[in-house]
Image (cartoon, rainbow, N blue to C red):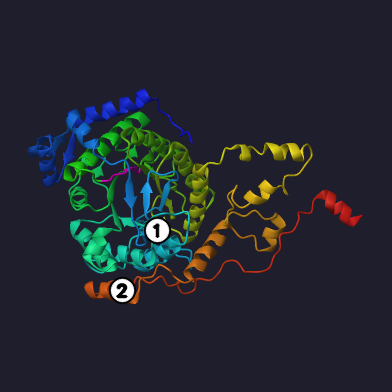
Amino acid sequence: MQFFTFLEMSEVVRVHEASLEILEEVGLLVRNQKARRRFAEHGALVDEPNERVRLPAAVVEKYRAMIPPTITLRGRDPRYDVTFPRKLPVIATASSAPDIVDPVTGLTRRATSHDIARIGHVVNELDGFDVFSISVLADDAPENQFNLSRFYPALKNCLKPVRTSVLNTDEARQILKLGELIAGSPEAFWERPFINFGYCSIVTPLTMDFDSTENLMFFAENGVTAYGTVAPMGGINTPLSMPGMLALINAEWLAAACLAQMSRPGTEQIYNFLPVFADLRDGAYAPGGIEVGIMNALVCQMARFYNVPSGGYLGLTNAKISDAQAGFEKGMSPMIGALSGVDFIVMGGLLDALMSFDFGQVVIDNEIAQMVKRVRSGFDFSEDALAIEDIKRIGPAGMFADSAMTLRDMLSATFMPEMADRQLRETWAEAGSHSIHDRALDKAMSILTSPNRAALDTQTDARIRAAFPGIVAGEATLPEGWTPRIATGGLRRERRMTSRRRALTHA
């Protein structure tokens, strides 16, 4: 597949050169003293009183060359491990919304650890998603167990790679201990560490904060799978122009990536970003903007230039409910990403500018993810696929429905959606005229009422609960009052009554 691009190679090189110029002449404000020392030890110019770090071009070139070309995210079950780049993009749920649309009342409320357990169970059974990026916060977390109350219910109910960020290294150690308890021993866990972290050490423009930068170095030093994200807001903390924004965030990503390599050469990275553009009519945060997809295409080109995996938060929306706006905003930027060669897409389940999770929406987004993968999977171009002999044999006015090739490929040649409705209008109306959101909520409910194949065994769970007194329950139980939206029945797919058929019927 030939990937879509905006930039000529000379323009890619110019962006790289501009980023080097920014890092060497402007530098970064680095709040973490340990990071400043580490930069200085590896050739950076450090103005300690002003906390300013400048990176000569030669230093950047040396350390960015150490970034591996692939990264592996691991799950509790190794069958779900993903190494990329690969042919198909790796697709994750979007993460860390404070709220959830309650599936019983339809009203937005604060999310809890119980919701994380349910989401983990649902995501485990949705084939479009490869990674569970923990979708919500946990408002019921006990003191000193905030992110433990997120990782525990997620890992307890999902076999796929699980990731999110933590506040500091103390929380990271707590989560890694959880991994050791699940694995059965520290040795077993570190032989195959299946917990994945994210961090956002860069505060655009050109600032590295204390805790997230400390996390970056801790993860690298200890060989923990983690990757950073740059999260600019075009027109607010970056130039509004695409080239200006790209040069700035590229400089920021290079700086953070170099610090990771200075901490441990060969540390796996993703060129991952969450670019948003401000709606300058009122300053609104606009992750659903089409420019997010355009910027993703640019970042994909830079990532290929550096020979590293590319990633992005795509398929986000400003829509408050699962409506047409959510549909087109969630469909456009992931498709641009797929066509541009993105390796990792964070997209599923969130509404309202990353503020709320919706069970119906995550099932719909799963279908979008499957369609994105269908595009990237391409098709077989062969003499057999050209079907010349079939075309000759069947000829003018013929039908291909009963050809051997059609029968062979009828379930694989085209994507067969489960949520998208393709029935006749009369059949749809007779069944209750239900929306795709109704069908998606019922799908989520059916998963939650089925056996949970990801559940931890009782002995492992007992070890965890003994090690962390007062930890949340982490059970993926169905909320009381959640009932199906659509009555089941034996409605059959009928032929549409055309005017010609109607006339023949009444003749």
Q: Which mark is first along the chain, 1 or 2?
A: 1
Relative to 443, is 16 above or below?
above
**Amino acid at pointer 2:** Asp
Query: Regarding mark 2 in the picture, which secondary structure is present there?
Result: helix
Q: Pointer 1: residues within 10 angstroms few (<14), some, or many (20+)?
A: few
Would you say 212 lies left or right of 400 here?
left
The residue under label 1 is 79
Assign the C terminus to one quadrant of the image: bottom right
Would you say 362 lies left or right of 149 here?
right
Q: Give the percent coordinates (x, y) of residue 474.
A: 35, 70
Of 400 and 429, the residue lying toward us: 400
Which label sits on residue 470? none
Of 20 and 438, the residue lying toward us: 20
Query: Regarding mark 1 in the picture, which secondary structure is present there?
Result: helix
Q: Give the percent coordinates (x, y) of residue 114.
A: 37, 69
Magenta part of the protein: which range? Answer: 268-274
Question: Can residue 241 be seen here?
Answer: no
Question: Can residue 165 be seen here?
Answer: yes
The residue under label 2 is 461
Cα distance between the residues tagged 2 and 1 = 22 Å
Would you say 170 lies left or right of 130 here?
left
**Amino acid at pointer 1:** Arg
Of 136 and 45, the residue lying toward us: 45
Q: Is residue 93 magenta?
A: no
Q: In terms of image quadrants, where is residue 162?
A: bottom left
Would you say 110 lies left or right of 32 here?
right
Residue found at the very far top of the displayed protein: 10
Q: Pointer 2: residues within 10 angstroms few (<14), some, or many (20+)?
A: some
Q: Give the percent coordinates (x, y) of residue 307.
A: 32, 36
Residue found at the very far left of the displayed protein: 49
Q: Give the percent coordinates (x, y) of residue 133.
A: 36, 55
